[in-house]
Image: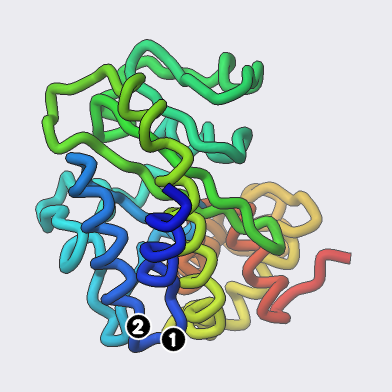
Amino acid sequence: MSKIVVDDLEKVRVSGPDKIRAAASALSAIALDREMRAAPAHDIADKRTPVDIDGEVLAREVFGWGDDEKVWWRNSRIALESPITSACRFEAEPFWVNADGFRTITPNSYLDSIDINNFESRAMTRSAIVVPVHMAFGQIGAVSFNPLDGKKTDLSEDFARHGDLLGIYARTFITSYVKVMGATQALPPGSRLSKREVECLRWAAIGKTDMEISMIMSRSRATVRFHIHNASTKLNAVNRSQTVFKAAQLGYISLN
């Protein structure tokens, strides 16, 4: 088994931007051999998903996911709504999940408090083996392995047989992808913020509400929301907190 790991490990490792697609194809093949389809995310807080050197979305071009409006990688709110994403914030080892709950290698009481109502619609799958990938600077990635049989909900045997190996392959792919593409994707195109957007975020960073900011700036509440929303879109942030954080990272505001 160790030889299989070593041989395939180098195939899924991204050694440069031009090797991304080949590594993704190798990970996809590993998943398909186990009758599963991989769904990779390099950052669960980012609306974007991994791309190749030409900017093509790997979920669509390599991993075989569709391009319709309901597909997971086009759902900008999945980072906030999916119980799978929530679980990745509290668990570092592979786990499997369905509508009945989470199954981990060792017990994790934090997962018991995660709401799994309407699991299928919120997670956009009936079941999955999930590999959280915790990296430097607090970034969390994940790879979800979903059964090709869309009706399959019991993954206990698959998890026992493949969970650890899928964990190794997934972590290698995601961590190497982030190292290679991190600098490229750190600054989204068109990320330059306007003076008003920066001013709103400065007040938001110290805890001021939209109403308070509107009074301070002598602008309407709707105008404040408009500027913060625009900043969020430019920075590819999923919520107000991440917008403030990314603006600070780029030097627009200070958190001190």
Q: Residue furthest right?
A: 256
Which residue is at 65% across, 74% downward? 198
The front one of 3 and 217 is 3
Amino acid type, label 1: Gly
The answer to which of 73 and 252 lies nearer the viewer is 73
Colour pattern? rainbow
> In what element is the residue under mark 1?
loop
Q: Is residue 71 above or below residue 98?
A: below
Q: Which residue is mark 1?
A: 16
Mark 1 and mark 2 in contact (Cβ < 8 Å)? yes
Does the image show residue 190?
no
What amino acid does circle 2 point to? Lys
Q: Where residue 79 is drawn, which disc sits there?
A: none
Res 19 label? 2
Q: Quadrant of the C terminus?
A: bottom right
Residue at horizontal 26%, vertical 38%? 146
Residue 145 pos. (x, y %):
31, 42
